[in-house]
Image: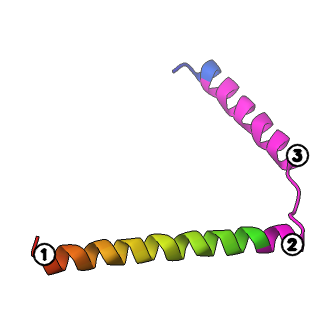
Amino acid sequence: MSSNKLINWFRRLREDWNRIITVARKPDRNFFSLNLKVTLLVLVVVGILAYIIQLTLTLIGV
């Protein structure tokens, strides 16, 4: 990669980050709370499934 391409790549990367930061906004309390609850629920469900699979495989001796 030539130095000119590398400079252009970094310039576009900086512009992309500036665009993202300009558009992004802080979530309100209700939206954050909902996201937190959904995330924790998914973690619990995946953990329970993993535990059940591990227990089943242990009991059948695999």
Range drawn in magenta: 6-33
Magenta segment, prevailing SS (helix, strand or loop):
helix
Label ID, residue 30: 2
Residue 6, compared with residue 17, is above or below; it is: above
Task: State which tag comes first along the sequence, 3 or 2.
Answer: 3
Residue 50: horizontal and vertical position, in percent?
36, 72
- Tell me the distance, in whole angstroms, between the alpha carbons under discs 3 and 2: 20 Å
Residue 43 on image: x %, y %: 53, 72
Which secondary structure lies at badge 1?
helix
Q: Is residue 20 left or right of residue 61?
A: right
Q: Is residue 23 above or below residue 8?
A: below
Q: Report the residue marked by disc 3.
A: 23
Residue 27 covered by magenta stretch: yes
Cα separation, mark 1 vs mark 3, equals 53 Å
Disc 2, SS: helix
Q: Left or right: where does residue 44 sit relative to residue 34?
A: left
* Disc nearest the viewer among 1 and 2: 1
Q: How crowded is the residue under tag 2: few (<14 C-alpha within 10 Å), some, or many (20+)? A: few
Q: Which residue is mark 1?
A: 60
Which residue shows up at 62% across the image and 20% down it? 5
